[in-house]
Image (spheres, grey):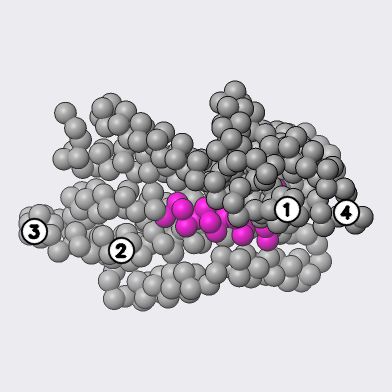
Amino acid sequence: MSVLIARRLARCVVLFLLSLVLSYALASTALDPRAYFEDRRPPPPARVVDRELARLGMDDRAPLPERFAHWADAAVHGDLGRTIDGDPVRAEFGRRIGVSVRLLLVGTVTGAAVGTLAGVWAAARRGGIGDRALAGFSFVVLCVPTFVLALLLKTGALAVNRAVGGSVIKYTGERTPGLQGDWSVHLRDTAAHMVLPALCVALAAIALYSRYQRAATLDVLGADHLRTARAKGLTPGRALLRHGLRISLVPMTVFFSFGILTLLTGAVFTERVFGWPGMGSWLIDSVEKGDVNSVVAVNGFAAAVVLLAGLVADVLHALLDPRVREP
C-alpha cells in the first residue's frame, strides 16, 4: 500500500506542476491586464501602465518564458505575486481558500454519502415508486445548470422569508456583517449561511452518485455469489450488504475523482450566486480584470483538489479491491 501511495503521490506532483505551467501560459496569453488600466477614466499614460505591469509581473512585452521563470522562482519561496490591484496573492488566497474548502467539503461529502446510499436503495427496489422518483429527481437536477439551481434555491429562500416576515433562511454572504456575540453565535450564523450553497453542491452530487451507484449495484445483484447467498437463506437486502456492497463501491471510487471536477465547476457559480467570497467568485472577478497571477493561483487550487480527489480514489480502490495493490 505504501508503494502505491508513493507512486500516486509522485504522479500527482508531476501533474500539478504541469498544470501550473499550462495555467500560466494560457492565462498570460488569453488575458489582457493592460486593458484593465487603459480602460480607466482618464486613462493613465502608457509609461505608467508599463511600469505598473512590470511591477506586478504581468508585463506583456517581456517573453513568456522569462515571466514564468520569474513567477516560478518567487512561488517556490512562497510568493505568488501581486493581484492586479497590487495586493499580495498569497494573502487573498489564504483568505478565500478556507471558504471554498469548507463549502466543497460539506457539500461534496454529504452529497456523495447520500447519493451512494440512495443509489443502493434504488437498486434494491428496482422499478418501484422510490426508484422512479429518485430517477426523476436526478434527471431534473442534472438537466438544470448549476447557476439556475442556485437561483431557484435563492428565490425559494426569499419567498419563505417574505411569507414568515423575517430572515429565517440566510441566502447571501458567508456570515452576517457586524454580528455580535461569542463563538457559538458566530458558528450558528456561519452554519445558517452555509445551508443553501452547500445544498446546491450536495444536490448535484446526489444526482450524480445515485445514478452511478444504482447501475453499479444492479450489476452486482445479478452476480453468482449473491444468488448463492440468497439460496442459503439470506434476504436480498442482507445478501447485498454482506457480499455485494463492497464490490459495487469499487467503480464509484474511480468515478469520485472525475465527479469532483464537475462539483468544483458548479461551486464556482454557487459562490457567485450566494455571494460567498471563495475561490470561485475570485476566479470570475480575476478573469474580468485580466489578473494573470490570481487566475493561476485559483487554477492551482482547482488542480490540487482534483488530484487529491484522484489520490483518495486510488487509495480507496486499493482498500476495496486487493487485486490492484502492488507488492
Residue sitting at x 10%, y 54%: 225
Q: Residues within 10 Å of mark 4 (few under 14, many from 20)?
A: few
Q: Nearer the viewer, residue 269 or 61?
A: 61
User: How far apart are labels 4 and 2 at the CA level?
Assistant: 59 Å
Identify residue type, mark 4.
Pro
The residue wearing badge 4 is: 43
Disc 3 element: helix
Q: Which mark is residue 214?
A: 2
Residue sitting at x 38%, y 62%: 210
Q: Which mark is residue 224?
A: 3
Disc 4 element: loop
Q: Position of residue 114 (x, y in %)?
A: 43, 55
Q: Residues within 10 Å of mark 2 (few under 14, many from 20)?
A: many
Q: What segment is highlighted magenta in the picture?
A: 259-279
The residue wearing badge 1 is: 289
Residue contact between numbered discs 1 and 2, judged by CB atoms under 8 Å: no
